[in-house]
Image: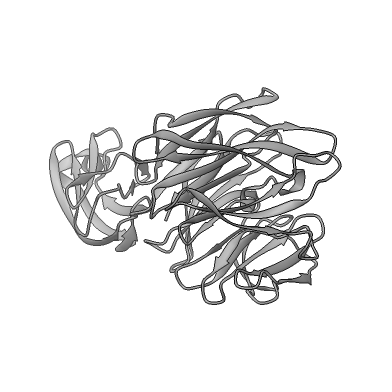
């Protein structure tokens, strides 16, 4: 029996699952006669998988990017076996990461890099920046314009605010094309304060005066390169305005404010601000292709669906024993890419793919020193 198992001529495929899958997810192939010392290759419709492992008599292979539906082929020591056909949905969104280059330094060196989801490969830095504190301030990507907005915190004073330098970065030509200073409360220096929709970036600018710290709502038109709209928030009755997600059906910006656990809605027609007090705080809000409003809870390690009207939690989408650091929703496959961290002092993170259609979670990588993941979708 042992001699038969080690003989590659007796190798055969018993079954494989799933038979309908997505790029970057894993397929498990059950076999007989598997030689663990052999040279084994797995091809998905002719595209070789670079992530192949052996677990007993099972071969686990990650579906590579640019593969398509077709034959699933296993080659052992040059002998080819066609397991059958497999249906593959390709991830077409582009992903980027903010990579922690010097996690032990007080002034962190961060690089912004492309990230190949399908092959789990980190690209060369597009640009580098120095960041104060253990977080990335604000990064937003405009798919239609292929532009990135980055607001980098430069200095924090004693008046409760931080100075930030904001600039646009052209992802097509890999060059910085615009710089301008912004001011914001320290608590507002989260990714959500800069929002992008309707080919425009929105943010809240604070007056550069330690006494007069009034704030202004600003709209920057990406087509014209001009500040198109400014609203004095003090005159509106509230200096705040959470900028997290744009709701096209109501022409509103909605979001949560950190600290006071309030959900707010701001009309872009009238600039009327409506606020709802909640017992929870949700960050990193995003809209799915189905129109659901999703965010991750600040204290709990969950992705939850939020009521667009009043900010109530409607459903738990995903739960983990880790802390959700950042997440992105894929418009092309409907999956969630979730960056998790186990401990406050642990520099490395893990990146999971959660597929809501089958409830399967795939560990993409657990050896990442990254602060955030962003998609151009």
Compared with 7, 251 (above or below) is below
> Which one is nearer the viewer's eye here, 366 or 282?
282
> Which one is nearer the viewer's eye here, 98 or 84?
98
* Side (left or right) of 287 relative to 307: left
Estimate the x, y position of residue 352 in percent, counting from the top left: 50, 50
Q: Using the rendered image of the protein, determine whether residue 340 is visible from the camera's viewpoint.
A: yes
Marks counted in the figure total: 0
Q: Quadrant of residue 265?
A: bottom right
* Side (left or right) of 225 relative to 58: right
* Side (left or right) of 153 relative to 38: right
Q: Name the image quarter holding the C terminus.
A: bottom left
Compared with 70, 248 (above or below) is below
Q: Residue at x 86, y 42 (%)?
A: 211
Estimate the x, y position of residue 223 in percent, counting from the top left: 42, 53
Estimate the x, y position of residue 208 in percent, counting from the top left: 75, 39
Estimate the x, y position of residue 219 in percent, counting from the top left: 57, 55
Q: Quadrant of residue 16?
A: bottom left
> Which one is nearer the viewer's eye here, 237 or 166?
237
Q: Residue at x 40, y 29 (%)?
A: 124
């Amino acid at each position: 029996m042992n001699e038969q198992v080690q003989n590659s001529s007796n190798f055969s495929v018993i079954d494989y699952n799933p038979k309908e899958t997505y790029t970057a997810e894993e397929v498990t192939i059950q076999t007989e006669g598997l030689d663990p010392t052999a040279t084994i290759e797995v091809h998905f419709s002719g595209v070789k998988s670079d992530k192949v492992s052996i677990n007993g008599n099972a071969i686990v292979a990650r579906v590579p990017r640019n593969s398509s539906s077709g034959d699933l082929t296993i080659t052992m020591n040059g002998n080819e076996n066609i397991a059958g056909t497999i249906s593959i949905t390709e991830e077409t969104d582009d992903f980027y990461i903010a990579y922690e280059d010097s996690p032990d330094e007080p002034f962190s060196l961060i690089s912004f890099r492309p990230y190949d989801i399908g092959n789990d490969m980190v690209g060369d830095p597009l640009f580098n920046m120095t960041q104060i504190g253990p977080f990335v301030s604000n990064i937003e990507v405009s798919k239609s314009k292929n532009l990135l907005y980055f607001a980098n915190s430069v200095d924090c004073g004693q008046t409760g605010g931080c100075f930030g330098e904001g600039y646009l970065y052209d992802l097509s030509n890999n060059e910085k094309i615009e710089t301008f200073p912004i001011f914001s409360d320290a608590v507002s220096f989260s990714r959500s304060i800069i929002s992008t929709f309707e080919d425009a970036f929105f943010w809240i600018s604070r007056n550069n005066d330690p006494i007069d710290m009034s704030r202004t709502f600003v709209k920057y038109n990406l087509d014209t390169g001009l500040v198109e709209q400014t609203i004095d928030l003090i005159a509106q009755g509230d200096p705040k305005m959470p900028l997290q997600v744009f709701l096209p059906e109501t022409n509103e910006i909605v979001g949560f404010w950190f600290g006071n656990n309030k959900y707010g809605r701001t009309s872009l027609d009238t600039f009327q601000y409506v606020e709802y007090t909640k017992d929870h705080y949700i960050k990193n809000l995003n809209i799915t292709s189905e129109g659901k409003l999703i965010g991750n809870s600040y204290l709990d390690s969950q992705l939850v669906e939020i009521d667009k009207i009043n900010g109530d939690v409607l459903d738990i989408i995903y739960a983990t024993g880790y802390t959700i650091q950042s997440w992105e929703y894929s418009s092309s496959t409907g999956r969630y890419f979730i960056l998790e961290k186990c401990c406050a002092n642990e520099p490395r993170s893990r990146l999971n793919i959660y597929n809501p259609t089958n409830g399967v979670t795939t560990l993409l990588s657990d050896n990442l020193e990254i602060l955030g993941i962003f998609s151009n979708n």
